[in-house]
Image (cartoon, helix red, strand yellow):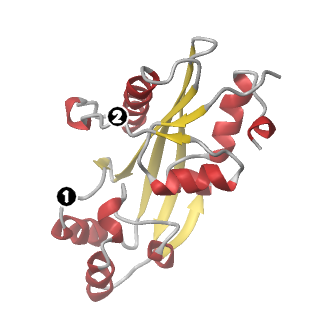
Amino acid sequence: MKNSPPFVLASASSARLKLLKSVGINPIVCSSNFDESQITETNPLKLVQILAQCKAEIVAQQYENSLVLGCDSVLAIDGQIHGKPNSQAEAIARWQTMRNNYGTLYTGHALLDGKQQKTLISCGITKVYFANIDDQTIKDYVKTGEPLKCAGSFALEGKGSLFIEKIEGCHSNVIGLSLPLLREMLQKLDYSIQTFW
């Protein structure tokens, strides 16, 4: 196993940072500020992988010989791709579609190893089942502001967990970063997760 280089998170997401810290990785944080609107891919799996790679590549230019992780999440419901809602009205409308329904959450992971000049791209996929909540509850939840910060209009690690009935797949993937998938990607690059502890 190789010694671990500096680990850089190419994301401003506090939820992703918290996940990494919870497993002993204390990354350098550097947001890519990538303009996502320039990518027009309609397949959710391909979309999140492209976005994750673009974010990681931008940040990797500033951090040579480092491991750079880029991530991106979207929620697909009935074939429609959803990122962060742009307004309270959009978040309310989305929750009215989501309630008593399920969505598939895709999180793209791009791990760039500057030392070995290698790039791994993967995607975590998790099914999320939503409770049948009434309009007033939806409005009250959206008023908290939490749904406006998240792909899919809910935060599993926050108040949104009250309205999630079941999850099929990786729990941390829904928060924005699949920890088991990250461990596998590090192993493929010949790094052990323990070297970050």
Under circle 1, the secondary element is loop
Q: Left or right: 160 with respect to 139?
A: right
94 to the left or right of 103: left
Q: Quadrant of residue 66?
A: top right
Secondary structure of the residue carrying tag 2 is loop
Q: Which mark is residue 114?
A: none
Q: Quadrant of the N terminus?
A: top right
In this view, the residue in front, 103 or 115, is 115
In the image shown, does 136 or 85 lie closer to the viewer? Answer: 85
Residue at image location 74% in from the left, 28% down from the top:
187
User: Quick check: 128 above or below 141?
Assistant: above
Residue 19 placement (x, y as % from top left): 60, 54
Mark drawn on residue 43? 2
Quadrant location of the C terminus in the rendered image:
top right
Which residue of the protein is positioned furthest toward the right in this rendering?
1
Which residue is pictured at 60% across the width and 34% down the height?
7
Question: In the rendered image, which quarter is residue 180 located in?
Answer: top right
Q: Quadrant of residue 191?
A: top right
Task: Look at label 1 and name its amino acid.
Answer: Asn
Q: Amino acid at mark 2?
A: Asn
Q: Position of residue 155 (x, y in %)?
A: 44, 66
User: Neighbour class for label 1 at 10 Å: few (<14), some, many (≥20)?
Assistant: few
Q: Is residue 83 left or right of residue 53?
A: left
Please name the residue that numbered disc 1 is placed on.
Answer: 86
Q: In the displayed structure, does residue 52 sit left or right of residue 80?
A: right
Query: Label 2 near label 1: C-beta < 8 Å?
Result: no
- How far apart marks 1 and 2 lie (CA) works out to 21 Å
Residue 189, image x, y percentages: 70, 21
